[in-house]
């Protein structure tokens, strides 16, 4: 902060504290350790103040006729309490303000609001996907009543409504907080949701002839404090309390949105965004969130193969090495989807095998102006920093292809890329004397490769990547690799051993340590120091275009 | 801690053992006489005869799933029993009810419900935790099988054992 921020004195539950000007009362209370229940308030959205859950008792300093605060015996201003409750989300702190968050009036207000919110609630927690992370459940226990006094018939509202291809609405569970409406309008810039009907019949609906099909629609499910909006994909799949949440990053584009991987027994059930205000805020695009499906459709490569026959790891690594050694001239195609540790080992392996020609495959798409950048590779910056590619990624691919076509290059080591995507044809692949490929999913290259070494998917490995803005971020391992798959760093260090190099790389931490000794940019760092939110590694933010 | 057990001080007749042997034999012959006369009935001929008639109301046998008087499977696959189960014997695959179903309001029903009876410890926590009154420990105790797979009770078996239980809470009344 370059400019001095004015600090204001605020009394919260009898304790005088200081908060910067502009802080909302609800945030100030939370910072003071007094959590205020809320449904509609979300720090990243505008404040409508319509759920009434955050009611507090508020007071302003008593003033003398000459507008001086009246001081009490303790030298602090005396507070004149406003006799009715105020909402704390739509109110900034001001000098001498007093707040009571647990007075009898506040408690009674919260109880009353909870009772109103639950009047038409279907109480179907056993079938509701939100159960376990539902604000209605939590606040009912903490601030509500155990019994219902409501004897009349509940209002019927539409259930199981498809708002869009990925979002399902149960209007009976909705508390009309309008978070989803505001999100679509203010963040996704696709104003499709709104309220229809009045009073007890009021519900959320899409505007006529529109559907909730924005690529950010699933974020409305995340911010929905109750079970009204649910993900059609995750619906009824698994109860949330079974999910182990692993902090990791998204690998579908160069930004590297921070995510939580919700998995159980080696199976990913959902991916949700994780707050990181330096990267993705609280959101991620739907396309990235649902992209884990390709790993679980049963097509994964599960064991190493030599000449299309199932093999063991020691055999496959030995076969890969003898293949590569026999080739007269080698080239290497590296994926910019690999982690820094893997790229570093790939570079070491390249020099051990005397490979001078190597490059990554650039992936460029249309940026969406919100979170998806043009660069669709998650670690282009890392590949550049570690020397796996040049300043213009992909520029060497043409040389490799020409070399293969005129017969000077007879062997290719492909690390996680499909050569067909790099411009090769099936005939080019058939011409190669040696083709060794690591991959997660089968493709034309693995079909043509003499040795296939199956690697670990993003949820199965630990490592680091550098995003387009030069931020070093960490992937964490949610579960063990499927089948006989191995972490890529393990495969690469085994290949490195096979070339006769001695090294002491026994864990991914060792690889990082070795990398931090060899690459000045990583000096003094380790995987632990990166932290859950990452750290800015490269000062110069690189252009968003690859 | 080691300690010494004092031997009883036996009288002369007790040291002889004979009187006690005679007394014991007398009891045995007495029983033999009653058996021959058909007055006592000592051995239960299991499995032709069973304990079933003597089982108390609160007996905890094999866990089963029940349907209600409308024919609805009461389980909505909330997976609380799976969560509470101490030996992790329960495995549920949740599924949804088709929208044209008679009970479409419930929306959810188990696609698969497996209880591994070789793991079950008959603790009854699943019955206690169930918010839908769908799982009950009935009086089946002789659960046998020739393999581990045989010991897993699948959904059909669980409903077969559980049967119908009328008079439970009618929670999913579509009019309410």
Image (cartoon, coloured by chain):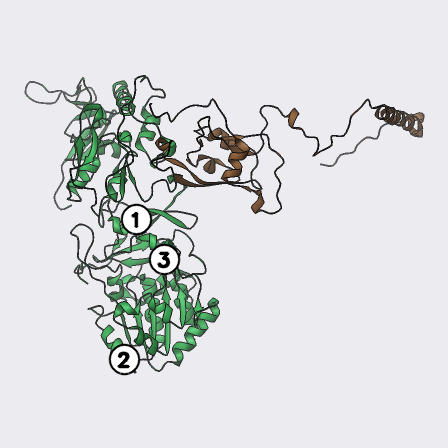
Chain colours: A green, B brown
The chain letter for the residue carrying disc 3 is A
Q: Residues within 10 Å of mark 2 (few under 14, many from 20)?
A: some
Of labels 2 and 3, the one closer to you: 2
State the count of labels: 3
Discs 1, 2: same chain: yes
Give the Cα separation between the discs numbered 1 and 2.
43 Å
Give the Cα separation between the discs numbered 1 and 3.
15 Å
The chain letter for the residue carrying disc 1 is A
- Estimate the x, y position of residue A186 in percent, counting from the top left: 15, 41
Which of the 4 image quarters holds residue B26?
top right
Q: Pointer 2: what residue?
A: A405
Element under disc 1: strand
Q: Which mark is residue A259?
A: 1
Element under disc 3: loop
The chain letter for the residue carrying disc 2 is A
- Estimate the x, y position of residue B29 in percent, counting from the top left: 89, 26
Of labels 1 and 3, the one closer to you: 3
Give the Cα separation between the discs numbered 2 and 3.
32 Å
- Estimate the x, y position of residue A56 in percent, counting from the top left: 22, 24
Q: Residues within 10 Å of mark 1 (few under 14, many from 20)?
A: many
Discs 1, 3: same chain: yes
């Amino acid at each position: 902060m370059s400019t001095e921020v004015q600090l204001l004195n605020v009394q919260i539950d009898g304790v005088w504290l200081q908060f910067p000007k502009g802080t909302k009362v609800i945030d100030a209370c939370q910072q003071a350790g007094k959590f205020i229940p809320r449904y509609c308030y979300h720090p990243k959205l505008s404040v409508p103040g319509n759920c009434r859950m955050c009611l507090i008792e508020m007071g302003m300093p008593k003033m003398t006729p000459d507008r001086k605060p009246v001081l009490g015996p303790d030298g602090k201003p005396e507070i004149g309490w406003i006799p009715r409750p105020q909402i704390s989300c739509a109110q900034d702190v001001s000098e001498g303000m007093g707040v009571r968050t647990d007075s009898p009036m506040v408690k009674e207000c919260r109880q009353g609001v909870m009772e109103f919110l639950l009047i038409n609630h279907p109480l179907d927690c056993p079938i509701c996907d939100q159960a376990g992370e539902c604000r209605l459940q939590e606040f009912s226990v903490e601030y509500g009543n155990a019994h219902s006094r409501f004897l009349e018939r509940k209002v019927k509202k539409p259930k199981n409504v498809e708002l869009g291809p990925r979002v399902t609405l149960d209007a009976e569970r909705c508390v009309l907080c309008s978070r989803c409406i505001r999100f679509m309008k203010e963040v996704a810039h696709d104003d499709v949701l709104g309220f229809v009907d009045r009073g007890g019949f009021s519900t959320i609906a899409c505007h006529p002839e529109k559907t909730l099909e924005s690529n950010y629609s699933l974020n409305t499910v995340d911010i929905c404090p109750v079970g009204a909006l649910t993900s059609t994909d995750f619906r009824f799949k698994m109860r949330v309390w079974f999910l182990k949440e692993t902090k990791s990053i998204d690998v579908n584009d160069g930004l590297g949105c921070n995510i939580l991987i919700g998995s159980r027994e080696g199976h990913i059930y959902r991916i949700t965004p994780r707050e990181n205000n330096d990267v993705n805020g609280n959101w991620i695009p739907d396309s990235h969130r649902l992209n884990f499906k390709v790993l679980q459709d049963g097509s994964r490569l599960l064991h190493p193969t030599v000449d299309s026959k199932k093999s063991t790891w020691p055999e496959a690594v030995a076969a890969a090495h003898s293949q590569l050694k026999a080739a007269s001239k080698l080239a290497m195609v590296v994926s910019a989807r690999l982690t820094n540790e893997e790229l570093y080992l790939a570079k070491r392996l390249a020099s051990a095998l005397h490979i001078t020609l190597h490059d990554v495959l650039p992936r460029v798409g249309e940026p969406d102006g919100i979170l998806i950048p043009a660069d669709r590779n998650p670690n282009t910056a890392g590949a550049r920093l570690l020397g796996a590619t040049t300043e213009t990624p992909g520029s060497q691919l043409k040389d490799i292809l020409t070399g293969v076509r005129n017969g000077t290059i007879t062997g290719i080591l492909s690390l996680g890329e499909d050569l067909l995507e790099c411009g090769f044809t099936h005939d080019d692949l058939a011409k190669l004397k040696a083709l060794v490929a690591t991959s997660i999913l089968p493709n034309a290259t693995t079909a043509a490769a003499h040795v296939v070494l199956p690697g670990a998917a993003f949820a199965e490995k630990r490592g680091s990547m550098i995003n387009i803005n030069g931020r070093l971020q960490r992937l964490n391992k949610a579960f063990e690799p499927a089948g006989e798959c191995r972490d890529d760093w393990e495969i690469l260090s085994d290949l490195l051993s096979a070339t006769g190099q001695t090294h002491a790389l026994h864990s991914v931490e060792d690889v990082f340590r070795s990398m931090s000794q060899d690459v000045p940019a990583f000096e003094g760092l380790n995987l632990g120091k990166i932290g859950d939110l990452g750290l800015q590694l490269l000062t110069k933010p690189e252009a968003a275009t690859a | 801690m080691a300690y010494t057990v004092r031997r009883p001080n036996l009288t002369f007749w007790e040291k002889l053992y004979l009187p006690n042997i005679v007394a014991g034999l007398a009891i045995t012959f007495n029983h033999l006489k009653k058996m021959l006369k058909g007055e006592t009935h000592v051995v239960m001929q299991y499995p032709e005869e069973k304990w079933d008639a003597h089982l108390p109301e609160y007996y905890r046998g094999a866990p089963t799933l029940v349907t209600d008087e409308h024919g609805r499977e009461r389980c909505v696959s909330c997976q609380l029993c799976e969560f509470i189960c101490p030996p992790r014997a329960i495995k549920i695959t949740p599924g949804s009810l088709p929208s044209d179903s008679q009970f479409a309001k419930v929306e959810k029903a188990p696609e698969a419900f497996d209880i591994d009876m070789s793991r079950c410890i008959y603790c009854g926590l699943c019955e206690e935790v169930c918010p839908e009154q769908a799982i009950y420990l009935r009086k089946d105790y002789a659960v046998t099988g020739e393999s581990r797979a045989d010991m897993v009770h699948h959904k059909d078996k669980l409903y077969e054992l559980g049967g119908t239980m009328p008079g439970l809470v009618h929670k999913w009344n579509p009019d309410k």
